[in-house]
Amino acid sequence: MTNTTRPYGILITDDDDGCRDALRSIVEPEGYRTFLASSGEEALDIIREAPIHLALLDVNMPTLTGLETLLLVHQINALLPVILVTAEPDENLMRRAIRAHAYSVIPKPVSKNVVLYTVVRALRIYGIPPKPAEEAAE
């Protein structure tokens, strides 16, 4: 398998099993390899050990919130694109997400099209080329 066809690793972090599974069911059929975490601490461990190209983080998690996790993720890998997912997207959160250098904030319940569009755009902006199937679709 060549580098242009290898699956990109996407970390999905949410303390709710159903939300993690919903996001996984959106990105895996598109050829992405998923890594699942139920907490910010678990997400940090995965980022240290696995080939992660993008992270989806729930904002409201116990212990470490998505924003706190994002700040720690960027200490490990400053260039890793991070998309926050939240059931409560408000202006205050948007300002805090921008200051923390989140790529985007996606509202829950998630839309398949919004998730895929945002993931592909984030990977491109951060210099990760699209998969061949994505190139053919354009």
Image: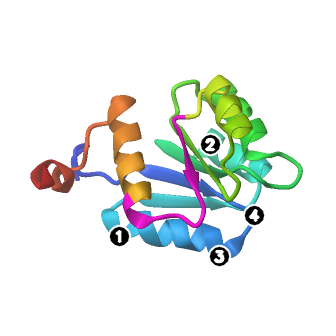
Q: Circle 2 sits on which residue?
A: 47
Kind of residue sitting beneath label 1: Pro
Residue 130 is situated, as x and y percent measured from the top left of the image, at: 25, 44
- Is residue 110 located in the magenta-colored stretch of the structure? yes
Q: CA distance from mark 4 to mark 2?
A: 17 Å
Which residue matches tag 1?
29
**Residue 51 visible to the viewer:** no
Residue 79 lies, in percent from the top left, at 51, 26
Dot 4 or dot 2: first in sequence order is 4
| Residue position for label 3 | 18
Label 1 residue SS: helix
Q: What amino acid type is highlighted by mark number 3? A: Gly
**How far from the left and from the top, in percent, is residue 131?**
24, 49
Label 3 and label 1: CA atoms lie apart by 17 Å
Q: Secondary structure at mark 3?
A: helix
Question: What number is the disc on residue 15?
Answer: 4
Evaluate if marks 3 and 2 touch, with contact meaning CB atoms under 8 Å apart. Answer: no
SS assignment at label 4: loop
Rounded to the nearest angstrom, the CA distance separating label 2 from label 1 is 22 Å
Q: Is residue 138 left or right of residue 13?
A: left
Q: Nearer the viewer, mark 4 or mark 2?
A: 4
